[in-house]
Image (cartoon, rainbow, N blue to C red):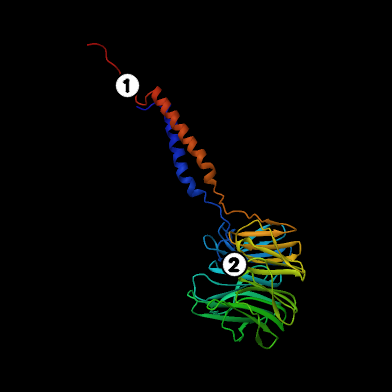
Amino acid sequence: MYCSKQRPIIFILAAVVSLSLLLPLAIPATTVVSADDGGRQDYPSEDAWLGCVWGSSPSDVFVLGYDAWGIGSTILHYDGFTWSPMSSGDPSKQLGRIWGSSPSDVFAVGYEVGGWGEGTILHYNGSIWSYMGGDIRNHLNDVWGSSSSDVFAVGGLTRGDNSESSSIILHYDGDSWSPMSSGASKELGGVWSSSSSDVFVVGYDPRFWGSIILHYDGSTWSPMSCDTPNWLSDIWGNSPSDVFAVGSNGTILHYDGISWSPMSSGTSSWLSCVWGSSSSDVFAAGGNGTILHYDGSAWSPMSSGTSYDLHGIWGSSSSDVFTVGDGRTILHYDGNWAPVVLPTNEKTDIWVVIGPIIAAIVIGLFLVYWFLRRRKPLVPPAPTTGPK
């Protein structure tokens, strides 16, 4: 017969073990999930590629990219205090550029990851992102407009062996997107406009290491002479007669309203993006954390504090500038460049917290049981009989 005083210990031990086995099923990990079916609404992983940044004000800033090892399509929004993740509606899209006419009229372009030449256009109405456009058989690399009813998206496609290259220009009139004939056969990488009749596009042909600049006067696209063998990646202007284009090998070109001319950048790094607040306050960023500043007379290097490649740059003023890049890098400039620290996606798992406590209780009860059993066996010895 078992000792009745030790039965409660056995029952408690059995209950604790059962609880420890069932608790992980009863308490799931807590993860932030989007309200729609567009996928998870998380922060990008440490390896995420951030391709562009744009905002309508210091308290309305968007960052786009792609997280190949995590959530897929990445959209972050800054309200002036906090960075928050947004759902793109489709995690398979790699988003590369963004532009908007207002906080509730924002366009983003990119392409289908894993697809061949399947471009994508998203629109944000102030509440949700939604898909626009039809069957787009080219990557889209940039978007820009002069108003909500005058938006241009450009891109193209280059095969992996560089044997073929194509271009695409789409125009949005406020109702629908339609293709435009440009006569170009090179992939287009950047677009900027001062008005509906003054649009610039830059591109490149990886087959021949040649660049292209196109200009639209409101009716016709025409090539412009740029005289550079290097690729051109991005373009930005302060006025129709003050336009900057950047590209490979530290290339910077300037347009004065008459012709394009090279500028000395002092670097051989690939320059991926350019933006400015005035003719004497222009920033360019690119490979290996390169950031340059133009003060109206010369370009000079700036200390970024990172070696990651930078892909996008935008600001609301000369003292409020963001640049983004590889390794989910976001830098902010307010007179000095400093990194923006994003939260991680560590799950709040209650079991991780109380699991060790349960384990300690189980071990403690087992030790008590073992100690009591050594002192007083569960099955008392058989009574001894006297001598015969």
Q: Nearer the viewer, residue 343 or 123?
A: 343
Residue indicated by mark 1:
381
The secondary element bearing badge 2 is classed as: loop
What residue is at 49 percent from the left and 35 percent from the top? 361
Residue 13 to residue 26: above or below: above
The disc at residue 260 is none
The residue identified by callout 2 is 88
On screen, residue 273 versus residue 111, left or right, reads right
Tell me the residue at 49%/70% (across/down).
114
The N terminus lies in which quarter of the figure? top left
Residue at the image position 44 percent from the left and 30 percent from the top: 367
Describe residue 320's horizontal placement relative to residue 370 as left or right. right
Q: Which residue is pictured at 49% across the width and 36% down the height?
A: 360
Q: Position of residue 36 (x, y in %)?
A: 58, 65
Residue 239 at x, y percent in the picture: 76, 77
Q: Quadrant of the C terminus?
A: top left
Name the amino acid type tagged 2: Ser
Q: Residue furthest bottom?
A: 219
Left or right? Give the position of 241 relative to 156.
Answer: right
Dot placed on the residue nearer the N-terminal end, 2 or 1:
2
